[in-house]
Image: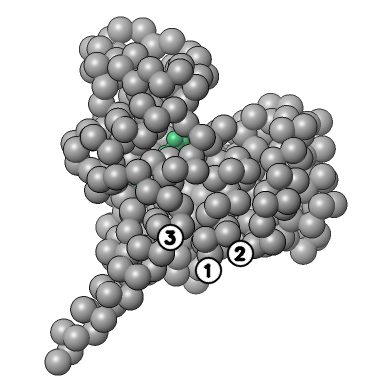
């Protein structure tokens, strides 16, 4: 989550007992190293770094500098996403780093396991942000991936609490990842208007939009999104994000949001989100166990 998954949010997530992931899509070692240090200063809890292949590989020199820096500074866990899982796995494994790959398809999951990754983040079509044209929703996808791979699976998409977490575990996952839920947290750096729009959105409050030349993403179904869907040209994705994250212009943007918006009813602290999730997870597990009588 470009610009959002930085020190304030990542350190809060890790300090709450979950596992924060620092974004590096800006492809700028100065930013990544600054944020990395800020997280280290804020908490002793472990955190990881996401390496989005598609964004990094366009500048191989900066890409290498970022990976070398992270390895030298003792990063222990990395996720790769949006691209070829073979690109970093060997280099990172040689340095003793655990590598999970993020994918939205069964084919991508099998390819990543063949490339030697240690685990997967499996993103269903409910998820926010840039999407794969071949994706399916989590219910079928998680089972399909579980049937074919033995590595740990982190489920993403449509999860905001322990009910979703218990469901994901039943479908074959060992962990969960949440995006939209954490954007609507007190520690998220985005404008309050964006958080309020996430809280206000209903279960049908998102839509898919094309971002030419090749991206497609799920975001809030705003007046802007409706107009864009009818063929009005979109302005640059990066400009939209600045308008929304910093200036809070919800109506003239289509900020990333998953179908999970319909399950988010208030902005909470990260600690509350994590605690509620774990508590309701065990409640659901007890409820299911009681079915045995
Ligand atoms: C504001 C925001 C920005 C995101 N940006 C990206 C992105 O640039 N690339 C990507 O692969 N996923 C992106 N995601 C998707 C998340 O990494 C995660 O897979 C997704 O949010 C999970 O679904 P959920 O939102 O229902 O929890 C973004 C999500 C949000 C909410």
| Direction bottom: furthest residue | 293
Q: Give the Cα distance between marks 1 and 3.
A: 24 Å
Q: Is mark 2 on a helix, strand or loop?
A: loop
Front tag of 3 and 2: 3
Q: Position of residue 87 (x, y in %)?
A: 69, 45
Residue 151 got which mark? 1
| Direction top: furthest residue | 232
Residue 125 got which mark? none
Asked whether the residues under the numbered discs 2 and 1 touch, taking CB atoms below 8 Å apart as contact, a structural biologist would say yes
- Residue occupied by mark 3: 274
Q: Give the Cα distance between marks 2 and 1.
A: 6 Å
Residue at 14 percent across and 92 percent down: it is 293
Residue at 35 percent across and 70 percent down: it is 279
The part of the image, by quadrant, that contains residue 34 is top right
Residue 118 got which mark? 2
* Vertical position of residue 112 compared to residue 277: above or below: above
Quadrant where ligand 1 appears: top left
């Amino acid at each position: 989550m470009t610009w959002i998954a930085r020190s304030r949010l990542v350190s809060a997530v890790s300090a709450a007992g979950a596992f924060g992931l620092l974004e590096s899509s800006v492809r700028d070692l100065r930013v990544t190293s600054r944020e990395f240090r800020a997280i280290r200063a804020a908490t002793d809890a472990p955190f990881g770094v996401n390496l989005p292949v598609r964004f990094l590989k366009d500048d191989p020199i900066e890409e290498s500098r970022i990976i070398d820096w992270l390895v030298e500074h003792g990063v222990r866990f990395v996720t790769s996403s949006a691209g070829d899982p073979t690109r970093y796995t060997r280099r990172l494994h040689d340095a003793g780093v655990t590598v999970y790959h993020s994918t939205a398809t069964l084919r991508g999951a099998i390819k990543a396991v063949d490339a030697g990754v240690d685990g997967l983040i499996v993103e269903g079509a409910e998820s926010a942000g840039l999407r794969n044209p071949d994706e399916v929703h989590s219910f079928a996808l998680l089972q399909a991936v579980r049937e074919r791979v033995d590595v740990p699976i982190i489920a993403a998409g449509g999860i905001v609490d322990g009910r979703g977490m218990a469901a994901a575990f039943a479908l074959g996952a060992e962990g969960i990842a949440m995006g939209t839920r954490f954007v609507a947290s007190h520690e998220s750096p985005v404008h309050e208007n964006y958080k309020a729009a996430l809280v206000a959105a209903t279960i049908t409050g998102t839509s898919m939009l094309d971002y030419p030349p090749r991206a497609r993403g799920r975001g809030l179904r705003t007046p802007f999104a409706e107009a864009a869907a009818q063929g009005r040209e979109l302005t640059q994705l990066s400009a939209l994000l600045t308008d929304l994250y910093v200036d809070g212009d919800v109506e003239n943007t289509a900020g990333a949001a998953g179908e999970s918006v319909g399950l988010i009813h208030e902005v909470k602290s990260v600690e509350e989100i994590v605690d509620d999730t774990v508590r309701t997870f065990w409640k659901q597990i007890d409820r299911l166990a009681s079915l045995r009588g």
